[in-house]
Amino acid sequence: MRGKGRRLVVDADVGRAAADQGRAERGQPIDERALRIALCLKAFYDAGHIAVFSPKLIAEWDRHVPRGSSGRRWLVRMLERRRVDRLREDLDAEWVEELIGENLTGGDAEVAREDKHLVSCAVEAAEYRLLSCDDKAREKYARLANDEDLARLHWVNPSWPTCKDWLLERAPDRPKWTLLEIAT
């Protein structure tokens, strides 16, 4: 499938959770959730999407996604095809920090702070698209969806059964998948 895809941020937890499809071919058991995530990475590639990575996100992939894993092989393939936009520096997430500080406290604020670099990158450099398995952080950010930029953010979990089709359809606007809709 050729054509212009979208720019999306892909959290390191996606690469870490993707199943090694070779396990299934060897008759070894494979987790259905992990297989769906791996199929989403394949759909991401097949649809012509561009992965946007900040320096902090690349460092997370290096720390958390094992060499030789399905997720790591996907990233190498994306790099070889020049389908990764590596930002030169981390984007200023101060606006995200202000929203967190004004609206969340304690553990909720800490959970949100861990992913503020992903959110600022998705909003500022990736067409308001973020793939992440972190539903806890997603729920915290949904509580901040009164912000115009966060309201538009598509935070999509690749373990959802319909994510693969969404990616193959070129990640169109799906209001029900935005943080604003999640919050309501």
Image: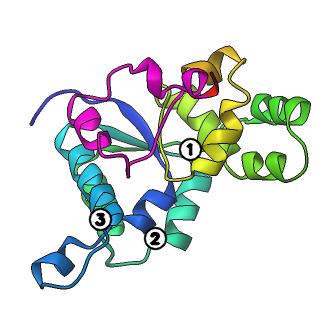
Q: Earlier in the sequence, mark 2 or mark 1?
A: 2
Q: Residues within 10 Å of mark 2 (few under 14, many from 20)?
A: many
Classify 3 as above or below 20.
above
Q: Residue at x 62, y 54 (%)?
A: 56
Of pointers 2 and 3, the one earlier in the residue sequence = 3
Q: Is residue 64 visible?
A: yes
In the rendered image, the vertical position of residue 147 relative to residue 93, given as above or below: above
Looking at marks 3 and 1 on the same chain, the residue that comes earlier in the sequence is marked by 3
Q: Quadrant of the C terminus?
A: top right
Q: Kindly identify the amino acid type of the residue bearing the numbered disc 3.
A: Glu
Q: Residue furthest front?
A: 184
- In magenta segment, residue 156: yes
Q: Are marks 2 and 1 in contact (CB under 8 Å)?
A: no
* Total tally of numbered discs in the picture: 3
- SS type, badge 2: loop
| Residue 90 appearing in the image | no
Residue in the image at 38% along x and 19% along y: 173
Q: What is the CA distance from the residue labelled 2 to the residue labelled 1? A: 21 Å
Determine the secondary structure under disc 3.
helix
Of 8 and 83, which appears nearest the observer? Answer: 8
Q: Are marks 2 and 3 in contact (CB under 8 Å)?
A: no
Residue labelled with disc 1: 88
- What's the magenta region? 153-182
Where's residue 143, x and y in %? 72, 30
Report crowding for label 3: few under 14, some 14 to 19, many 20 or more residues within 10 A (C-alpha): few
The residue indicated by pointer 3 is 32
Q: Which mark is residue 65?
A: 2
Of the residues tagged 2 and 3, which is closer to the observer? 3
Label 1: how many residues lie within 10 Å, few (<14), some (14-19) or many (20+)?
few
